[in-house]
């Protein structure tokens, strides 16, 4: 049970792999994440992540197309990668700069974010989302 929700939404950056959870595990991330955080949520996709999902949807027919449909429910933010910056590096940088939570199941990215003190939402078990780290205000 959530206490009264603070007024401002929490920004949650989604990694591409997180858009496959609803398909693989029948989890409505757009309902489960606000419930987990006890807050309103603004779902954000950095443009390189969105482009990655759209490219996969063009190449394949199944879950990739459904993931692209889910991506349309997010706010796509145009951002540039720095020279030599990977998408994971970009997500970590933006999360720190913008004070965002990151939703990812990528173990390497989770470790990196943990070291940076960035809260992470990930799938635990076969259908339960969990928050690792502390939300700020």
Image (cartoon, grey):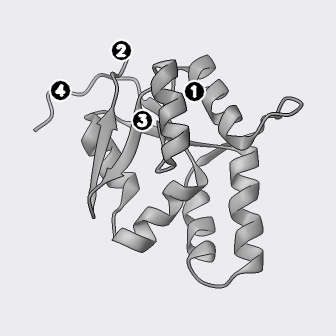
The circle on residue 130 is none
Residue 128's place in the image compared with 24, above or below, is above
Q: What residue did someone put label 4 on?
A: 4
Query: Residue at 41% across / 72% down in the picture?
Result: 24
Q: What residue did someone put label 1 on?
A: 95
Mark in the foreground, 4 or 2: 2
Q: Position of residue 88 (x, y in %)?
A: 66, 40
| Cα gap from disc 2 to disc 1, whole angstroms | 15 Å
Q: Are marks 4 and 2 in contact (CB under 8 Å)?
A: no
| Cα gap from disc 4 to disc 2, whole angstroms | 13 Å
Element at label 4: loop
| Cα gap from disc 2 to disc 3, whole angstroms | 16 Å
Element at label 2: loop
The crowding category of the residue bearing disc 1, from other C-alpha atoms within 10 Å (few below 14, some 14 to 19, many at least 20), is many
Element at label 1: helix
Q: Foreground residue, 41 or 100?
A: 100
The crowding category of the residue bearing disc 3, from other C-alpha atoms within 10 Å (few below 14, some 14 to 19, many at least 20), is many
Q: What residue did someone put label 3 on?
A: 120
Q: Are marks 3 and 1 in contact (CB under 8 Å)?
A: no
Query: Residue at 27% across / 64% down in the picture?
Result: 126
């Amino acid at each position: 049970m959530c206490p009264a929700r603070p007024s401002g939404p929490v920004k949650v950056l989604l990694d591409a792999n997180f858009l496959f959870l609803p398909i693989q595990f029948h989890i409505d991330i757009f309902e489960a994440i606000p419930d987990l955080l006890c807050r309103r949520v603004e779902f954000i996709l950095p443009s390189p992540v969105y482009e990655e999902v759209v490219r996969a949807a063009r190449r394949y027919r199944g879950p990739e197309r459904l993931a692209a449909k889910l991506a349309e429910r997010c706010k796509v933010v145009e951002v540039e990668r720095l020279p030599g910056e990977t998408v994971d590096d970009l997500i970590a940088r933006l999360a720190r700069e913008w004070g965002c939570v990151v939703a990812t199941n990528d173990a390497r990215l989770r470790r990196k974010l943990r070291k940076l003190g960035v809260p992470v939402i990930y799938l635990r078990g076969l259908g339960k989302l969990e928050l690792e780290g502390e939300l700020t205000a």
